[in-house]
Image (tube, rainbow, N blue to C red):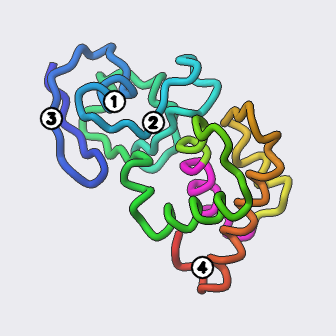
Amino acid sequence: MKVSFTVNKEQRTVESDPMARLLDVLREELELKGPKEGCGEGECGACSVFMNGDLVNSCLIPMGQVEGAEVITIDWLKETEAGKLITESFAEAHSVQCGFCTPGMVMAVWSLLKENPDPSEDEIRLGISGNICRCTGYDMIVDGVQIAAEKANKAGGTVW
């Protein structure tokens, strides 16, 4: 079936099996390598994207549900002011080790900070809880989120 949807602010149409996963279409057909295949079960968050404004696991979304949707991936976000601020803050806090979880983690952080620009540590941990990181123990990621929030708030908070 033909599926037309917006990906990273560009209208796209792909020929796809309606049960094909959004993750596979993004990576293989559209060559957007930011979302990663981690668990394939919606547990790790490595494949996180925004679909119609909601943070979702693209490994769980069949293409039959994508018609007319707006999809945003880390490939777009990383080029924005918000994406750069989050990634720079992660680097400052040494939040990244192997980097596999980083795309999904950045997407979750953006989602959190758009809704709550000054989160507590508990709110940060809840906000990233859909993402698994096997390297950091999460403390450095929480530090990176706090740094991003502080920098954005000092700049007037309009980045989100």
Please report contact status of discs 1 and 3: CB closer than 8 Å, yes or no: no
Mark 3 nearby-residue class (10 Å; few <14, some 14–19, many ≥20): few
The residue under label 4 is 157
Q: Quadrant of the N terminus?
A: top left
Please tell me which residue is depicted at 71% across the width and 51% down the height of the picture.
95
N-terminal label among 4 and 2: 2
Mark 2 nearby-residue class (10 Å; few <14, some 14–19, many ≥20): many
The residue under label 2 is 35
N-terminal label among 3 and 2: 3
N-terminal label among 1 and 3: 3
Location of residue 154 in the rendering, given as x and y in whole percent from the top left corner: 67, 85
Eye-nearest disc, 4 or 1? 1
Location of residue 94 in the rendering, given as x and y in whole percent from the top left corner: 72, 55
Q: Give the side of residue 98 with respect to residue 118, left or right.
A: left
Q: Which residues are magenta?
A: 106-118
Q: Residue flagged by tag 2: what amino acid is it? A: Pro
